[in-house]
Amino acid sequence: MAAAAQLTDEELFSELRRFGFSPGPVTESTRPVYLKKLKKLREDERAGARGGANKTRNSNNNNTGAGAAPGGGGGGGGGAGRAAPGAVARLAGAEHPYLPGAAAGSSRSRAAPPAGGSKVLLGFSSDESDVEASPRSQAGAGGRRERASALFRGLRPAAPHGAGGVSNSPPPEAARRKPSAWWGAAARRPAAASAGAQAPGSREPGDGEEEGGEEEDEDEDEEEEEGGGEQQQWKNRTVNGNRLLSFGSRDKYSDSEEEEAGARAKQQVPKEESAVRRPRRSLSKSPAPFTASKCAAAGAGMMETGQERAGGVCGAGVVVTNDRAAAEAAAAGSLDRGRNHEEEEAAAAMGGGGGCEELDSSPPTPRYRIGLSKKSPTVLLLPAPLTDMDSSKITDPPGTIRKATNNHVLSGAAASYNVESRIYSATNSLPLGGTSSLRLNHSNHTGSNHTYLKNTYKKNLSEPEEELLQQFKREEVSTTGGFSAHYLSMFLLTAACLFFLILGFTYLRMRGSGVAEDVEVNIKHPFSGKLQKIQEDEISLMMNSLYALHDKLAQVAGEHECGSSNQRNLTVQEAAAYLKNLDPEYESVLNTSLQWILNSGEDVGIKCLSNDPNEINVTNVTNVKYLESTSPKMSFRCRFRRAFVNITHRLSILLLGVAMVWGVLHYMKYRWAKEEEETRQMYDMVVKIIDVLRSHSEACSENKDLQPYMPIPHVRDSLIPPQDRKKMRKVWNRAVDFLAVNESRVRTETRRIGGAEFLVWKWMQPSAACDKILVIPSKVWQGQAFHLDRRNSPPNSLTPCLKIRNMFDPVMEIGDHWHLAIQEAILEKCSDNDGIVHIAVDKNSREESW
Amino acid sequence: MSSTSQKHRDFVAEPMGEKPVGTLAGIGDVLGKKLEEKGFDKAYVVLGQFLVLKKDEELFREWLKDTCGANAKQSRDCSGCLREWCDAFL
């Protein structure tokens, strides 16, 4: 290698080219940078196993992101491949030969996954449901990513090589195995290699996923949770971002050596499966092999038999993947077997929340472990909601159950996310996989699986639902405090209402009885003054009789008032008879008392009437014919009713009055507005007329043939369209009058045109230079400020809101609805927009906002 | 937008025209002076360098570090700013 310092520009250029990096012009300023880059690339090439290529990879990712896709991808791919730790050496060795060969397509594909990976990483972290998982996974994912990318690289080269690349695939497989060895997975390399070699072509779409799966495959025979988990997580991330994880199925394939058809069900691997796998890392991947074996028949991808041993892959996830893979794979026998195993596992899972033991019972799946969900609680319910995938249903229940038992907190949040991701991956996997294989699977397992699946699924569904419900119940419990507050306020309100009601009743009752006391007072009082000649006992007798009489009369009057009787008063005879009933002595004092009543000019509660009830009574006792109570005593209910009716009447009258006043005001406002409108129209018309006249006079000054005056009717007809003429007649007349009176530049005169007399207008003002200035600057669209194309408008608007200023001057605006006019103008101009959610005109300020 | 500075936003919002190099995000007074001494007195010259490096942010950052001694954050801000500007206007 030539010393960097002695390279000429061309040599530097070609050296960089050799590494697959496409440099720009090497000039004075760029030379040092490119030299450094060359150094770095050489170091990376030599170092290989060193993990220092992280930066390179990142930078390569950056590069790809920056747009130098091929170069960046190539460089990134190379760098990433080299950066892979552990197996990197082998991998690099394996990959490097492929690098040049797979330049265009692979570089592109390589570029995409790293970019996708990084992007996926970002997207993943921004995912709410996985926000907790992502930091954790990110921490550990760095190394993983390298490995994954390395694997990815290894995979990619293998992929393009297609069927003929069987020989190629073993090395990549071996390389991939390396990482699995890293994880501590036992290597089922041969199987995996053969599996891997199978169908690289079909792997293309699922390559991204495959990568993830491959890595998982590497975890074969390993129950390392951390490694597997993180790997899984990373893979999940990638997968979630991009595509289904087909590799997951590959992992499973590796285990099932018997199957070894090499079918790869990567396409089927849904993202969720990888995500599922993440939390369920502890679960063994043994089911995966089954699925893998199943998929082998489909010939979809490479069979990574025995690769999934690493404990990272959650058993359930794997099972799911297997299921999916199975669904897609066309292998009948292997599929059945795998399915059976999965069923067993599912059954085991269903049996008990943490029943890993049962799962472990299945021979090929010794590694099912339940202790997963520690890593990513969010993914806990991931496998659960898979509804559409019949094959996955089996795996879902187990995973769900396990997760449910472990994580309750995030069940709600994760469930929805999981469902979506699952469904998405399910749908993704479906198209990817062969429909024929799917049908095959269905036919194979319809009978036994469906009912079982349904049951398990339903159970699973209830589980997450239950968890959700529990969550909600907890929330409800927490809100009882609020409820009590609510009740308290209601109670207070009710108490206040009751209090006032009772007060009212008491008042009403008091009113009735209060009068009696007044009467007593009244009666007592005059006695002290007058009628001293009557003796004491007579006085008391009289008083008693009067009381009784008063009560009776009040009763009668009350009945009359309440409408039950039609007589308000009692005749004297009746009164006498009543009193006699009460007490014989009363009768004797009746006349005295009546006399006294008459003498006392005050209202004692008993009114004496003569024959004619309306006549004001006389002093003569003999004339008294009727006795009437002035304070009728009514029953409580009657009184209440009367009071209520009274109040209602008064209230209604009040309301009526208010309504009338309001109506009058409104009408006045309306009229006033109408007048304003008319005035505005009139002014508009005047302005238009002036414009017309002015332009006409200018035309006349240029063209001497025209008459300098314009008949008024002609102007009107030219300004007002025929259908409006009748409407605008009033306005027009006012305008004409206005012009006649106020406008000095226009003179009204009479001319004879064509034999008829016409009132004409003549524009008086000589057209001078200053006249060109329009009086009222017309507010028209002045055109676009600059040409609107992609260059001038940022792809993403910086803000969802826009404030437009100085569109109007609130002081100067005339008319009622100018703000509407402005809004319409803006909307008209922005009609090509995606949609304006809200527009508002701030009338008070000089600006406008929306 | 949450993680970009006001300077960044201001720069990316419109064509740079004849803006001085100090208006680039991450380029303050000191760095701006150094760049001007080297001949990069306007933002478009720095843009030119960025384009010559084929819009490779990593390389551009290296170059910036070598040229005016920008630290990682400053160079990151500058390269991000230029990249966004290019996305919007190029």
Image (tube, rainbow, N blue to C red):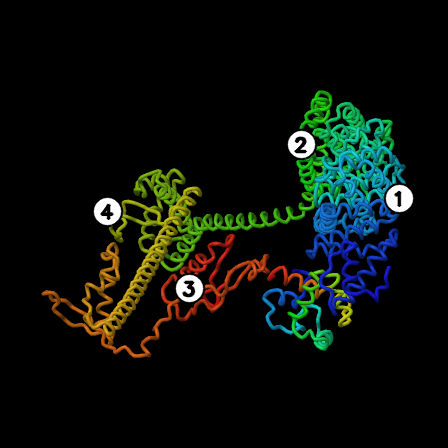
- Residue type beneath disc 4: Asp
- Of labels 1 and 3, earlier in sequence is 1
Label 2, label 3: how far apart the Cα atoms are: 56 Å
Which chain's residue wears label 1? A
Q: Secondary structure at mark 4?
A: loop
Have a look at marks 1 and 3 and say if they share a chain: yes
Residue at the (81%, 60%) spot, across then down: A38
Residue that carries the numbered disc 1 in the rendered image: A182
- Of labels 1 and 2, earlier in sequence is 1
- Residue type beneath disc 1: Trp
Residue A370 visible (yes or no)? no
Assess whether mark 2 and mark 4 are in contact (beta carbons under 8 angstroms). Answer: no
Residue A818: % across, % down: 39, 63
Mark 3 residue crowding within 10 angstroms, few (<14) / some (14–19) / many (20+): few
Mark 4 residue crowding within 10 angstroms, few (<14) / some (14–19) / many (20+): few
Residue that carries the numbered disc 2 in the rendered image: A388
Residue that carries the numbered disc 3 in the rendered image: A781
Instruction: Indicate left or right for B21 with A760 as reference.
Output: right
Residue A454: image quadrant is top right
- Of labels 3 and 4, earlier in sequence is 4
- Residue type beneath disc 2: Asp
